[in-house]
Structure formats: C-alpha cells, structure tokens
Amino acid sequence: MFVFSKNKSKTMYCFSPEVMLATFIVEIVMAIYVFVRYRLSLSAKLVVAILVLLATFQAVEFRICTGDFDLYLAKIGFVAITLLPALGLHLISRIAKVRHLIKIGYFFAFLFIFHIIFSGGAISEAVCGGNYVIFETGQYLSFPYGLYYWILLLVGIWVSIDGILFHRRKEREARSLFWMMVGYLSFMVPMMLLYTWDRNLLTAAASVMCGFAVIFALILTFKVIDIYKQEDKKEIKLPFNK
C-alpha cells in the first residue's frame, strides 16, 4: 500500500498498524504453506518469493508506523515491492510458456533497485501519513517507477489473455492464468477507479486497498499454484532462468 505524496495527515483508517501486522503474519503463513506443500516446484518458489516480499513490505510499513524513520528500512521495503512486478511476470510467463519477457522484467527491476539503493535522493523520507505510508521519492524516480509498475502489470495481463485465448493452453494452465488476472485486477481496478473518480482521493488509496494484498496472496496460494502444481522439478535459478 503506497503512494507518492507530500500529504502528511496523521489520521489512521482501516489500514492500521494492527492490520499491517496481521497481513504480514497471514502472508508469511501462506508462504510457509506453499513452500512445504510444493517445495520442489519451480513456480511455487516464485509464489513464495512474492508472498515473502509482500510480507516484507507490510513489516516495513508496521515499523514505520510504530517507530522512527529509518532510511535503510524504507529502502528495503521499496526494493521488496520493486521486485514484485518482475516476479509476477516471471510466474505468468512460466505458466503461459513464454520466455522472452522474463529477462526484460528483471532488467528494469534491478535498474530501479540499483537507483534506490545507491542514490541518496531516491527516497528522502517515509512517514505514516494517515491511512497509508508515504514514501517521498526523488523527482527522477516517481514517474518512471510508476510507468514500470503499470506496464509490467498490464503486460502480465496480456500474456495471460494470450495464453488463454490464442495459444489455448492446457486447462490447468489456463485456469491459473485466469486467476493471476483476477489477482492483478483485485488491486489495479480500485486504483484506476480512484484516479478516474477524483484525483484528490489519491490519499485514500491505501484505505481503499487495505486487504487487497491479502486477497492476491490467497489467490496465489489457493488458486494459481494449487491448480498449476504438476510441473518439472528443476531447481530455480533466479532471476534469469527460463
């Protein structure tokens, strides 16, 4: 749950520190469940990575809202969410049997991660601002970062549609791709509606979206990987394995 903003309202809504902590616990439990049940599955390891990164960001938000600002902690949280679109595209590409997009996703993810880690002006502050955590970023990061995020999410949806409708993947693969789209749309649609309805309501984004990360995690755990569980057992070689 994040937004680039200068607004520093201190009023908390549904996305309280307690909710952040509960979300962290739920996502960690699901990551353990997936690892234990499908630990030899390559795609399951990608799901575990996504769940752990989601949980990491929740933990960072909880710490920011219950303690003082820590630049290194804020960067850890930002790095965690930066990897998510690339990992999601990797998972979708494996299920859809598309290889050429995986390296592209990781290339841009690590480009942003390098900037976030080594640039002093990438993140200047992170505060618990009302119903979300505000990351104040440098002027050269916000727009390209948002572009990277939305393009990779939309590409993931397109690859899913292409795999279902045009390449006629097997039933279990098509169902997993369908649920990946549902998971993506569960947090993309509220954001798009928020922008369309009233840009001034952007500061309420985390309040609207609180719980959606858990919905996506549930979909990954009990729909996507549970359906797509009969695959090869090769060891994962992140980030560029095919």
Image: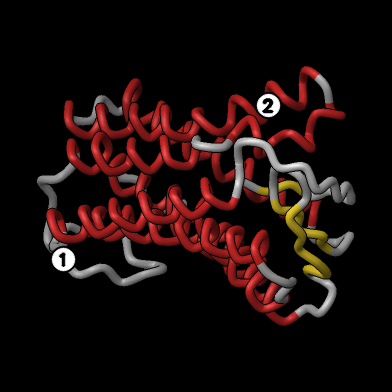
User: Is tag 1's residue or tag 2's residue first in the polypeptide sequence?
Assistant: 2
Q: Pick whichever, 139 or 60, lies toward us.
A: 60
Position of residue 78 relative to residue 237, above or below, is: above
Residue drawn where x is 32% and y is 25% of the image: 164
- Does residue 117 lie above or below 91 as drawn? below
Query: Which residue corresponds to mark 2?
Result: 192
**Position in image of residue 180 (x %, y %):** 38, 35
Q: Nearer the viewer, mark 1 or mark 2?
A: 2
Element marked by disc 2? helix
Left or right relative to 196: residue 99: left
Q: Amino acid at mark 2?
A: Met
Is residue 104 visible to the viewer in this orientation of the structure? no
Distance from label 1 to label 2 (Cα)? 38 Å
- In x, y percent, where is residue 129? 78, 50
What x and y, as percent, mark residue 113?
A: 63, 70
Q: For the view shown, which residue lies furthest in the top direction?
A: 197
The residue drawn where x is 49% and y is 29% is 186
Q: Dot 1: few (<14), some (14–19), or many (≥20) neighbours within 10 Å? A: few
129 or 186: nearer the eye?
A: 129
- Image coordinates of residue 112 in percent, x first then y, are 66, 66
Q: Residue at x 59, y 34 (%)?
A: 209
What residue did someone put label 1 on?
234
Instruction: Look at label 1 and name its amino acid.
Output: Lys
Which mark identifies residue 15? none
